């Protein structure tokens, strides 16, 4: 089964995550977590449910830290930001919710033809396409913000280097 959301596809048979057709590297536990969140899209998945899905009962680890790390790895794979989520929303004291619209298709299914569906399905398709565009814009906005921060830091260090250089030149005169 292939599950589509935003720019991504989750192939449950091959256990692969793809972004615009390219495979995204994701480890086994984060993959299981993403699958769990997608199967319960829109609903809150508790940290206990996540723990039960990721670790056998006889496993002794720091579950809270393990869940946090798995969620971070999923967000990294999706390019998602906890402060401005596009895919995974943190529900404080309760768990996590997959907030993106999900489209499920059978194995090897091609992109559905909107003219073959009733009008409500066309509306849903348009809403998902709109959401995908919004998600792409939000992710691009996050990347631009990261580049701006990097540029500001580089400019700050350049200014400091110039100031130190000017002081050295003045002291050596």
Image (tube, rainbow, N blue to C red):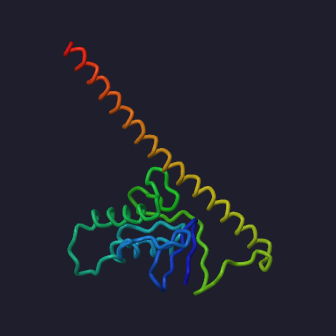
State left or right for residue 28 relative to residue 147: left
- The x, y position of residue 5, in whole percent, is 57, 69
Please tell me which residue is depicted at 41% across the width and 66% down the height of the picture: 74
Quarter of the image for residue 122 reads bottom right
Please tell me which residue is depicted at 37% across the width and 37% down the height of the picture: 154
> In the figure, 67 relative to 144: above or below?
below
State left or right for residue 78 relative to residue 111: left
- The x, y position of residue 126, in whole percent, is 72, 65
Please tell me which residue is depicted at 29% across the width and 64% down the height of the picture: 64
| In front of the other: 171 or 65 | 171
| In front of the other: 48 or 136 | 136
- The x, y position of residue 60, in whole percent, is 20, 74
Q: Quadrant of the N terminus?
A: bottom right
Count of marks placed on residues:
0
Q: Quadrant of the C terminus?
A: top left
Please tell me which residue is depicted at 37% across the width and 64% down the height of the picture: 73
| In front of the other: 106 or 67 | 106
> In the figure, 70 relative to 81: above or below?
below
- Farthest-out residue, front: 173
State left or right for residue 72 relative to residue 106: left
Quarter of the image for residue 170 reads top left
- The x, y position of residue 103, in whole percent, is 61, 74
């Amino acid at each position: 089964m292939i599950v589509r959301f935003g720019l991504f596809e989750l192939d449950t048979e091959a256990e692969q995550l793809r972004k615009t057709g390219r495979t995204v590297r994701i480890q086994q536990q984060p993959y299981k977590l993403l699958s769990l969140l997608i199967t319960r899209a829109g609903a809150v998945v508790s940290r206990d449910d996540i723990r039960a899905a990721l670790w056998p009962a006889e496993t002794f680890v720091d579950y809270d830290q393990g869940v946090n790390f798995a969620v971070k790895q999923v967000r990294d794979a999706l390019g998602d930001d906890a402060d401005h989520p596009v895919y995974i929303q943190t529900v404080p004291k309760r768990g996590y919710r997959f907030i993106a619209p999900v489209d499920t298709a059978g194995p090897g299914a091609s992109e559905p033809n909107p003219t073959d569906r009733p009008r409500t399905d066309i509306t849903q398709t348009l809403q998902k396409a709109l959401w995908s565009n919004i998600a792409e814009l939000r992710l691009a906005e996050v990347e631009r913000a990261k580049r701006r921060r990097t540029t500001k830091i580089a400019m700050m260090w350049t200014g400091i280097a110039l100031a130190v250089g000017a002081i050295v030149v003045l002291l050596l005169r």
